[in-house]
Image: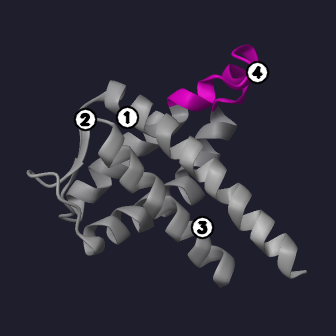
Amino acid sequence: MKPLLLRLLGNAIALYAATTLIDGIRFGAGGEVDIGGLLAVTLIFGVVNAIIKPIVKLATCPVYLVTLGLFTLVVNALMLLLTGWLAGLFNVDFQIDGFGAAFWGAIVISLVSFFLSLFISAESDDKD
């Protein structure tokens, strides 16, 4: 249970970083982040990445091979756009202004998640 909570916390931090660094990604009209909204978007983002993303990756496997994995950036942006759309369906005020913002936001989320996972795995290695 602890690894799942750490992963959710990491995704929440990464989503918050994307909303602060990318102009086209925001919570609400004023851009102020509430914890409940952030957690809701984090859960939606986690479900999308756990269920939808593997199906898309499998269906587009030849494109991944041809582009030497760079298509991952496009898929990540599409998953972020899908997260924004689903958040709207659940009345969570999370908005993404098009593919460009989603693309750069996905890059920020990937980098922040990567660096956080380094710290989390290093911390768990110390406890063993």
Q: Residue at x 35, y 24 (%)?
A: 100
Which circle's residue, 3 or 4, is located before the other in the chain?
A: 3
Category of crowding for the residue at label 1, using alpha-carbon neighbours closer than 10 angstroms: few (below 14), some (14–19), many (at least 20): many
Q: Are marks 2 and 1 in contact (CB under 8 Å)?
A: yes
Of the residues shown, which amino acid type is indicated by label 4? Answer: Leu
Local SS, label 4 = helix
Residue at mark 2: 24
**Numbered label attached to residue 7:** 3
Q: Nearer the viewer, mark 4 or mark 2?
A: 2
Of the residues shown, which amino acid type is indicated by label 3? Answer: Arg
Of the residues shown, which amino acid type is indicated by label 2? Answer: Gly
Is residue 96 placed above or below 116 in the rendered structure? Answer: above
User: Disc 2 versus disc 1: distance between alpha carbons?
Assistant: 8 Å
Taking the magenta stretch, the answer to whether it contains residue 114 is: no
Considering every residue shown, the one lying at the far top of the view is 66
Main SS class of the magenta portion in the image: helix
Which circle's residue, 2 or 1, is located before the other in the chain?
A: 2
